[in-house]
Image (spheres, rainbow, N blue to C red):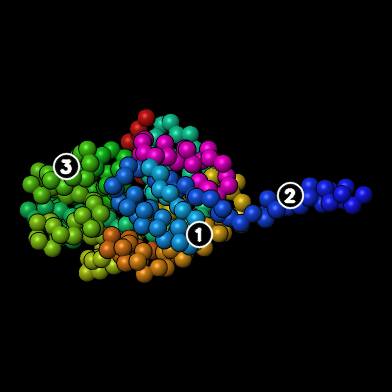
């Protein structure tokens, strides 16, 4: 009789022990939907080191690139929702691509559970010194005096540097002409050579050229000034209220991931982001921290960004397969 009770007790205790299993009890897969070596990959690897310490388990960065981040995002959306597969996403796969790509197998607002919004990288509008304009209003006046005479380079159709110009035209009533390149490097080279008039690029890339006088800063593209170059006014404060373009970074898990595991991951990311080493590295890279690190804040932000970029993408006419 006693043996029977013991066996029954063990049978009941087994599933309870499984439920009470400490998370994480094995390595966490941290998916980056872009190739190694880029800024997103570098940030993820910085975070992975701090997260390994915070979680007590290895956090392994896996690069799963392709289709502007869609391949990696789709893989994470389809992964088992157990907290062991998460993604370090950006504006592309978590907002813009929903409207930009004709074929997309996930929905950034409904296919994931948000974990934390990490921050964003401001862009800056820079022009070749040959342009007389030194402010947003002067640039608008120059374009309207001779419509469609000015152009701007981007890193490619549908890139944030392209859509930043579309949004500028929408808000300013200008007709800046888009010149797409295959990457930021070629676009910047032609701008420095005076082959194009301007570009919207990340502030760290532009900073040495601004400081050397090879490029002229017109305005920061975010709603607040950049900590890296606080002397440069925003485009919004120069007469285009609501103009806000940046690359944001957020961490998500597959939809259906248990709430307690989301909470554990959120706390680990908060601890990592608060460490002196991570803060120092991210500040040097120009990252502006998010104002709210709660999962709910990221969820709301993604929904807002999807709606905002749909309007801009539709106006641009850009579509990718």
Mark 1, residues whose alpha carbon is within 10 Å: few (<14), some, or many (≥20)? Answer: some
- Could you say which is closer to the camera, residue 121 or residue 30? 30
Highlighted magenta segment, given as a residue range:
64-85
Q: Earlier in the sequence, mark 1 or mark 3?
A: 1
Taking 234 as reference, is 260 left or right? right
Expressed as whole percent of the image width and height from the top left, the position of residue 83 reads 55, 49
Which type of secondary structure does the marked residue at label 3 adopt?
helix
Q: Is residue 282 visible?
A: yes
Query: Mark 1 or 3, which is nearer the eye?
Result: 1
Q: Compared with residue 169, is residue 74 higher up or lower down, i.e. above or below?
A: above
Mark 2 or 3: the one toward you: 2
Instruction: Quickly name the residue at label 3.
Output: 186
Q: Position of residue 163 (x, y in %)?
A: 31, 45
Query: For the residue labelled by badge 2, is the local secondary structure a helix, a strand or a loop?
Result: helix
Q: Residue 56's mark?
A: 1
Of marks 2 and 1, which one's residue comes earlier in the chain?
A: 2
* Magenta segment includes 125: no
The residues bearing labels 1 and 3 have C-alpha atoms spaced at a distance of 43 Å
Q: Secondary structure at mark 1?
A: loop
Cα–Cα gap, marks 2 and 1: 24 Å
Rendering quarter of residue 122: bottom left
Q: Is residue 243 visible?
A: no
The structure residue drawn at horizontal position 36% and vertical position 64%, both measured from the top left corner, is: 278
């Amino acid at each position: 009789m006693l043996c029977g009770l013991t066996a029954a007790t063990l049978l009941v205790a087994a599933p309870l022990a499984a439920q009470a299993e400490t998370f994480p009890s094995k390595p966490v897969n941290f998916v980056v939907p872009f190739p190694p070596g880029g800024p997103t990959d570098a940030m993820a690897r910085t975070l992975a080191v701090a997260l390994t310490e915070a979680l007590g388990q290895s956090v392994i960065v896996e690069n799963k690139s392709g289709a502007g981040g869609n391949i990696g995002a789709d893989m994470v959306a389809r992964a088992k929702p157990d907290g062991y597969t998460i993604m370090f996403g950006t504006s592309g796969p978590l907002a813009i691509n929903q409207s930009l790509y004709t074929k997309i197998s996930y929905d950034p607002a409904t296919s994931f559970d948000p974990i934390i919004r990490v921050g964003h990288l401001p862009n800056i509008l820079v022009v070749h010194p040959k342009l007389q304009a030194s402010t947003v209003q002067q640039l608008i006046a120059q374009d309207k005096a001779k419509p469609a005479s000015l152009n701007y380079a981007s890193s490619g159709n549908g890139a944030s540097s392209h859509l930043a110009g579309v949004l500028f035209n929408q808000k300013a009533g200008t007709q800046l002409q888009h010149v797409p390149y295959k990457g930021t490097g070629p676009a910047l080279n032609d701008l420095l050579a005076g082959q194009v008039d301007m570009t919207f690029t990340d502030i760290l890339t532009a900073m040495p050229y601004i400081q050397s006088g090879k490029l002229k800063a017109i305005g920061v593209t975010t709603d607040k000034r950049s900590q890296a170059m606080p002397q440069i006014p925003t485009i919004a404060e120069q007469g285009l209220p609501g103009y806000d373009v940046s690359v944001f970074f957020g961490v998500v898990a597959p939809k259906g991931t248990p709430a307690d595991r989301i909470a554990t991951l959120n706390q680990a990311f908060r601890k990592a982001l608060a460490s002196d080493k991570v803060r120092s590295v991210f500040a040097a890279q120009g990252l502006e921290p998010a104002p709210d690190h709660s999962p709910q804040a990221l969820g709301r932000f993604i929904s807002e960004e999807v709606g905002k970029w749909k309007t801009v993408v539709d106006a641009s006419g850009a579509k990718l397969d």
